Image: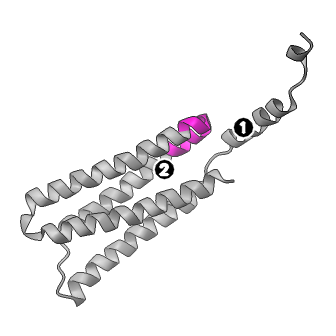
Amino acid sequence: MVHSHRFNFRRYTFNVLHHQRSDQEMNGKPFLIATLFTAALLFAIAMALQSFTAIEAPNFLFTAIAFYTLLNLLLFQLLKKAHVVSPNRFVTMFQAAVGLKLLSSIALVAAGLYFFPENRNSIAIGIMIIYLFFTFVLVRYTLKETKK
């Protein structure tokens, strides 16, 4: 009976730290800048490929870059809200965000192959490169913000 009323310092400390961490808002400004910089960089690379090499980047890739930019911003907002709720919700939402982005990549590749079969190699490789760049930005800035 004495043990049930005893003060549990570990549990108290965990609850205080957990509450403080989930109350802190994730800063979206660095993520926004990084996402827009990534989009601008990918646009510049695609345009340079068309201008200076024999490699032709289909216009579909420019649409894919814009799509991933908007998707990245939306997913970060959802992760930001989940971070405030609880760490468990954040982990679940993070896995869902990466999975959704992967599924959207598959859908974009399928759409590109269906509508532009003559550019299938450049579409498939281009979308995977775009996916990697934007996923790197999302993971890097999300982990950076959650460590604060």
Q: Does residue 5 sit above or below 122 in this rendering?
A: above
The image shows residue 26 at horizontal and vertical percentages of 61, 49
Tag 2, which secondary structure? helix
Q: Residue at x 34, y 58 (%)?
A: 68
Query: Seen in the image, is 10 located left or right of residue 142?
Result: right
- Magenta stretch in the rendered image: 78-89
> Which amino acid, mark 2?
Phe
Residue nearest the viewer, comparing 98 with 58: 98
In the image, 99: left or right of 12?
left
**Residue 81 makes an appearance in the image:** no
Question: What secondary structure is the magenta-colored segment mainly?
Answer: helix
Pointer 1 residue: 18
| Vertical placement of residue 111 versus 84, above or below | below
In the rendered image, which residue does mark 2 sit on?
76
- Identify the residue at the far top of this view: 1
> Looking at the rendering, which quadrant does residue 23 occupy?
top right
Under circle 1, the secondary element is helix
Pointer 1 with pointer 2, Cβ within 8 A: no
